Every structure is written in C-alpha cells, then in structure tokens.
Image (cartoon, grey):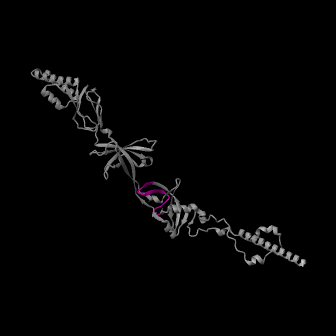
Amino acid sequence: MVERLKGKKWIAVGVAAALVAAGGWGYSKYASKQAATPAAEHAGHGAAGAPAAGADTVKLDAKARQLAGVQTATAAKRQLVKEIKTTGKVALNENNRAFITSRVEGRIDELYITAEGQYIAPGQPIAAVYSPTYIAAQEEYLLALDSIQKLRGASRDIVQLNDRLLEAAKRKLILLGIAEADIEHLSHTRQANDLMTVRAQFGGTVMEKSVLPGAYIMPGDKLYTLSNLSTVWMYADIYEKDLAGVQAGQQVQVTNNAYPGEAFEGVVTFINPVLDDATRTVKIRVEMANPKGKLKPNMFVNAGIKVPLDESLVIPVSSLLDTGTRKVVYVAQAEDTFVKRDITTGQEADGYIQVLSGLQPGDVVVTAATFLIDSQTQLGSFGGHAGHGGSTAPAAAPQATPSESTDSMPQSSAPTGDHSGHTGH
C-alpha cells in the first residue's frame, strides 16, 4: 500500500513539471513571434485619407480641397496705382509771412490792432505814434510850400530849386510811411500833426503782437507779425520704404475730420534731403490753397499720395507666404497637385503684389488655404505617422492554438523553481 502511494506521488510531480515546461515554451514562442513581426506593418496607420506630401509638392483630393477651402488665381500683367498714406500737420506759409516794423523813433500812444488773429488790410491804420522825426519832416514840407508861394516871381533857377526842395520834403514823408492822402491833407491844412498814423504796408492775419501802448520804439523795431493764410504749408512724414515713389510736383490729397467728405488738394514742393534717424522718415512739404481759411495752422490732417506703377506681372497678396528669408507661392500644376515656388516681389498696391521673377503669365497660384498646403510640405515623410503616439508599443499577443500548446510540447522537464513565476500562463 505504501509502495503504491509513493508511485502516485511521483507521477503527480512529473505531470506538474511537464505543465510548467509547456507554459514556458509557449511564452518563449510568443515572444519570438512578436520580435519577428515586421515594423513595416505599422507604417502609414492613421494616414488614411490624408493628402500625399512631398518635399515641395502636395496632392489634395477633391474632398480635402473642399474642406480646406482652396482657391486659386491666375498671374497676369496689370498696372497698379500705389497709394502712400500718412499724417501731416498744417503750418504757416513762410513765403507769406512778414513783419510790420517802425520807420521812425517815438512813443506809441495808441494801438488800433490789439489782439492776435485779427486781419489787417493793406493800408489800414494800426497805431498812432508821437515822433519828433515825423513832426520835423512835416515842417520841412510846409516850409518848402511857403518858399514856392513867396518866390513865384523869382528867376527860373530859384523856382526850380524850390520845386526840388518841395519834392525832397515830400519824398522824405513818403519814406517815413506817410500816405499820399495824408500828404495832400497836410498841404491843404498847413498844420503839422503831433501824432503819426502808422499804416500797414501789406495785409494779413496777425500772428504776433510785439508792442504795447506807451512803448518807445526805434526804426526797425517789430510791431506785428503777419501771415497771409490764403495758402498754407503741410508737413508730412514719408517712411523710408516709400521714398522712391515721392517726387516734387506730385499731387497730394488731404482730408480732415473737421470737414467730413471734403478733400483739399496740394502739391509737393520740397523733400528734405536728410532722413530722421529716430523715426526713419523723411519730411516733405506740401503747398495748399486755402481761400476760405478752413485749414488752420497746427491742424492735424490725413494725406494720401497716389503713385502709378509700371505694368508688370502681379498676383493677389493673399497668395504670398513671406518667411522672412524666402517668399513662396504654391502653383497649381494640376487640379490636385500644388508645387512650392520661390519668387521675387516688388511693390504692393490694390491688394496685389508685383512679381519680378519666379512666375510666368498664366501660372495659377493658390490664394486661400496656402498655410494648410505649406504645413503638408513641412511635415514631409513624417506626415504618415500623424497621431501614432503609441505605434512603438507591441501589438496584443495572439492566442495560442491547441496544436501549438500540446502537439509540439517538449518532453523534457525542468525544475519547478525556475518557472514558478509563469504559472499564470
């Protein structure tokens, strides 16, 4: 009985050892099979339906083009008109600016123009001055008149001498700024005036008043600063990149928010030869007619200069990709094929840009979804793995068939301690 129990015990131990050996063999076969699986089986997964992309060529099927909103335009020759827009400031026309100065020495008793901004007409009285020089000149003129009357019967030489003296006295009054009408009045009244009426030699708007009543003045002293505002200047800044299109004599259109819907015309009369280092701009001067006085000095305005460009090959601005070092467009070679091409560009105007080289008339370029197409060329050969973050993980282990687990099972047994961790298999 004891002998039979010992025999059964050894049979059970052998069966257990055989099962453990079979599990280890099945696991090793599974691992070797997984290692032999070609990596190429995972290439392109998740790229189903994605556009094919090359280094400089992209293919998009009809559905992809519709979803992306691809639009195209044809390169063609066209004459553009570039408009340079800037801001400016109205200033006084220095050619129409002048001073009214004193021609005599004396004391100002009264000023007839008391405020800046007042308009002075030519010949208008502006001040009353007590001047000994003026009084003495009147006396000389009156003495010359008396001499002529008293010596009418004298010799011809004396009469001519008196006439010359009278003419000299009259000329002296004129040089002092006395009007002809005042001289005639003096000759009739024969009474010298104590106060000299100073009249404006020319008209204009008072920009500055330099004297007050009671001030003592000398010949050459400034009384008023006048400016004729019938024409004004406008100064505007032109950026460095736009300088080539601005020339003297060009028409400039000026607008101001104070007069909506109204435009003022001007002409470029001067371009500063020195570039402002701080703002990188050049100041230009525009002369403008201002008959109604609507343009006030120091008023800010908007200015526009239209520059006609020569006829050249152009494309829409939206078709251009500017990377900073390259300027690229995508040319449609076929309905579904787009090729990257480097170009050289010129001036931009009216939503178009000139193409100096890189395209021919009739080439069809992409104007919408350009960034999407460019992204495909940037992805290149990596585009087929988009979304495969776990593509390096092994695939799920295949289930072993009964034939694999029993028919080829090795007959030799191994110690149970070596496979104690694989009992779950």
Q: Write the residue at 82% across / 73% down.
A: 17
Residue 219 locus on image (x, y percent): 27, 27
Tell me the quadrant of the picture where the C terminus can be found. Answer: bottom right
How many numbered marks have been drawn onto this rendered protein structure? 0
Tell me which residue sits at (33%, 47%) in the image.
266
Q: Determine the residue positioned at 40% across, 51% down.
A: 84
Classify residue 184 as left or right of residue 45.
left
Residue 180: image location, x then y, percent = 18, 31
Q: Is residue 128 magenta?
A: no
- Between residue 216 and residue 145, name the one nearer to us: 216
Q: Which residues are magenta?
A: 347-363
x and y, in percent, of residue 161 in the image: 16, 22
The answer to whether residue 269 is above or below residue 131 is: below
Image quadrant where one finds the N terminus: bottom right
Observer able to see residue 151: no
Q: Is residue 359 magenta?
A: yes
Residue that protrudes farthest toward the front in the picture: 1
Quadrant of res 213: top left
